[in-house]
Amino acid sequence: MQEKWWHNAVVYQVYPKSFMDSNGDGIGDLPGITSKLDYLAKLGITAIWLSPVYDSPMDDNGYDIADYQAIAAIFGTMEDMDQLIAEAKKRDIRIIMDLVVNHTSDEHAWFVEACENPDSPERNYYIWRDEPNDLDSIFSGSAWEYDEKSGQYYLHFFSKKQPDLNWENEKLRQKIYEMMNFWIDKGIGGFRMDVIDMIGKIPDEKVVNNGPMLHPYLKEMNQATFGNQDLLTVGETWGATPEIAKLYSDPKGQELSMVFQFEHIGLQYQEGQPKWHYQKELNIAKLKEIFNKWQTELGVEDGWNSLFWNNHDLPRIVSIWGNDQEYREKSAKAFAILLHLMRG
């Protein structure tokens, strides 16, 4: 495999709301991030994964996007975004955008038009049915919501304010690729792709993840956007195995650079307990087995590992398997050493 800059990259996730507030309103913002670039550069990072800063009603902390090509006012302006990209580049830091294209906000212009005008092209940008089946939302309850204006149900695997996009619609896919190229032209360093394994869904057959058209869609995306660019692309894939990861990240497949897999994260959960009820006792032998599997079965020639302990959906690893009181610093260093001594 030809060596890429991201093979040895250190990526720092920035959650904008809580990172750095530049104007005293109690909310982190883009100028605040820019003001901390020297600090981040001193840490030795290569890239920033920037959680969503797009225009959004914030029903799901920005993962409900109303306009992919505008910045939420609480975070600043597009000029602030351009400055962040430019100043980061001066320090050899790349900005990785969070790409959320499984769904939009119900306040996105496409969905508003789809509801107002059932004969519009935008209607087919979403998934509608006269009668719902029994698919469940990840956020609980039915995955279908009735729209009184049009008399049909629309699909939403997350909040009812996050209608799922219909990737079978070619015009929609082209709109998404145009949006991605808008950001690529601004000089970003790549995309982290939110729940990307869901875009090939077939709701009538109750296929939610890893649908048959998933990889053809990603190949098409690659060719239409980042394929000839030196960019990092990583897909969020909760159920991935090393064999599944190869389908995404084998360079010969021309899809993504790598995936986020969560097998090691599964050790945090207690069987039969709610999602946020964590297992404090670390099964070290099982953790070693999982890491060894991913280090050996996902080879250098057919993929690349993404190494991480936690993200915005998860508590800090030091607070779960370490000691965030008496041994906070020592715990953090131990976890960091383990992570950074692996290939990925």
Image (cartoon, grey):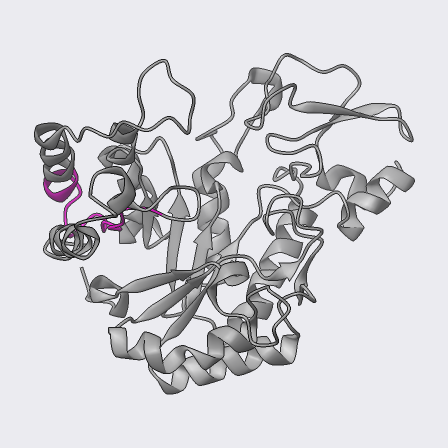
Q: Position of residue 217 (x, y in %)?
A: 50, 44
Q: Position of residue 200 (x, y in %)?
A: 52, 34
At horizontal 24% and vertical 29% (from top left) the residue drawn is 267
- In the displayed structure image, the side of residue 97 where residue 245 appears, left or right: left
**Number of on-image labels:** 0
Instruction: Tell me which secondary structure the magenta stretch mostly adopts.
Output: loop
Does the stretch in magenta take in 307?
Answer: yes
In the figure, residue 204 lies in which quadrant?
top right
At horizontal 41% and vertical 29% (from top left) the residue drawn is 276
Q: Position of residue 74 (x, y in %)?
A: 66, 65
Closest to the observer, 12 or 322: 322
Q: Which residues are magenta?
A: 294-310
Q: Position of residue 171 (x, y in %)?
A: 69, 49
Does the stretch in magenta take in 298?
Answer: yes
In the figure, residue 285 lies in which quadrant?
top left
In the figure, residue 332 lies in which quadrant?
bottom left
Closest to the observer, 97 or 321: 321
Q: Quadrant of the N terminus?
A: bottom left
Q: Residue furthest bottom?
A: 90
Where 133 sits versus 60, above or below?
Answer: above
Where 256 sits versus 267, above or below?
Answer: below
At horizontal 47% and vertical 42% (from top left) the residue drawn is 196
At horizontal 65% and vertical 40% (from top left) the residue drawn is 165
Q: Quadrant of the C terminus?
A: bottom left
